[in-house]
Amino acid sequence: MAKRALISVSNKDGILEFAKELVALGYEILSTGGTKKLLQENNVPVTGVDEVTKFPEILDGRVKTLNPMIHGGLLGKFDDPSHQAQMQEHGIEPIEIVCVNLYPFVETISKPNVTWEDAIENIDIGGPTMLRAAAKNHQYVTVIVDSNDYATVLEELKANGTTTFETRKKLAAKVFRHTASYDAYISNYLTEESFPESLTLTYELQQTLRYGENPHQKAAFYKKRLGSDFSLAYATQLHGKELSFNNIQDGNAALQIVKEFKIPAAVAVKHMNPCGVGTGSTIEEAFDKAYEADPVSIFGGIIALNREVNAPTAEKLSNIFLEIIIAPSFTEEALEILTKKKNIRLLTINFSQEKQDPFKVVSVEGGLLVQEDDTYGFNDADIKVVTDREPTEEEWEALKLGWAVVKHVKSNAIVVNNKQMTLGIGAGQMNRVGAAKIALEQAGEKAKGAVMASDAFFPMPDTVEEAIKAGITAIIHPGGSIRDQDSIDVANKAGIAMVTTGVRHFKH
């Protein structure tokens, strides 16, 4: 009796060669639909599944392989006398190899104008059922869901006449990961609740990393297949070493800040906090401002720019040590300049932001925190001038910039800035006045006539008092403290403007 292999694939890459090799090794090929037709057209001997089941495909192909003649052959234990007797009684022959991949559900729902009916028809039923049955019975059955595994299976079959248990177990685990991921895409597509009773997320391996946050930690980078394309997972690397764990964290932080701006902007990041943000009429001017904001901390940092990098900007970028430069594009001249530096990573990314992730997920010990992304901007806020003096037009522009930046700074956060650039940033302090002192000290004399942004309200007037001493002329913060009036009174006494937004921007 010939050994049997069942082949039914949506992705037909390499399947002809694989099937021909199996036939040469003495396997009878069972198949259905388009796979069967392809094999027949290429003179590969094939038996239709309906010839085995003695039952035709029905319901427009929805039912093909859901039959005991197939699943008995997949699930029967080859060395169990009871199983073998039952199979013999019902005329069921064992199936040693199953090669199946699934209807392209993800590709279907990725289409911009996909219909509900088309999505539903691309939910595979028979394929996952066969895969799971064969994977459960991997002690005896070799199951393949990935064309990259064809070569390994053929190599072992030719060498040993069978595959090893270790290989079958590895392939079975891959099948269960694959079907779990497939079901997750379907359930997420159908789910309307923001926070359902259970949550299954699926990601695909982008790359293994040399190490994690520190050299003793192993790490890998996974991408969300239907997630935001404004992401390092979908960036194109043009030059430089592979990204590290910390590069990816910092690069993501830089992207989240630079996307706040429509005008030319440049953002420098170190350890997931901005060290300099600049804007201008050109991208070169924007970078000049970002560099001027903190020419010390930018060393070894990451730069994200929201306009094409040209030669003059590239010349300036090349004069300092940077880990990564991210931009929508680089001119040929800019690339010629920057690629002279062997290790610098140059990445391009889609700035159209057509797809965005509405939720953020954070791992905690034993669980996940899920929340909506903080997309509140200045135009969403409940803006109120709470002091006697209103901001000048120039101060309004500066307050908008500060408010856009401070939401991306680790709390407690204070940003001192003018209308074009940050001047001082106080990040991650345990008290607000401490963050203010750091930002004001960094700004120095430039704080005179500048504005201040705070990610949360002032519980006491001490932060406002420090700002006034440094020469700050306008402040923006959420408000909402039971002692707001104390801060307002101090501001009025000094003649500075204060604006509240009604929106807090904590970041942990």
Image: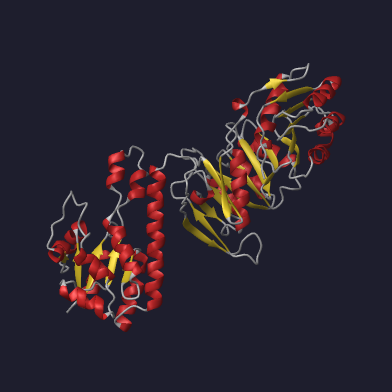
- 397 and 298: which is toward the camera: 397
Residue 208 at x, y percent in the picture? 53, 62
240 w.r.t. 93: above or below: above
474 w.r.t. 270: above or below: above
State left or right for residue 169 relative to residue 308: left
- 443 and 403: which is toward the camera: 403
Residue 41 at x, y percent in the picture? 15, 61
472 w.r.t. 166: above or below: above
Q: Residue at x 74, y 45 (%)?
A: 428
State left or right for residue 296 relative to residue 404: right
State left or right for residue 122 relative to residue 34: right
Q: Residue at x 46, y 51 (%)?
A: 200
Q: Is residue 20 visible?
A: yes
Residue 370 at x, y percent in the picture? 55, 45
- 185 and 235: which is toward the camera: 185
- 170 and 389: which is toward the camera: 170
Q: Residue furthest top?
A: 388
* Image quadrant where one finds the C terminus: top right
Residue 167 at x, y percent in the picture? 39, 74
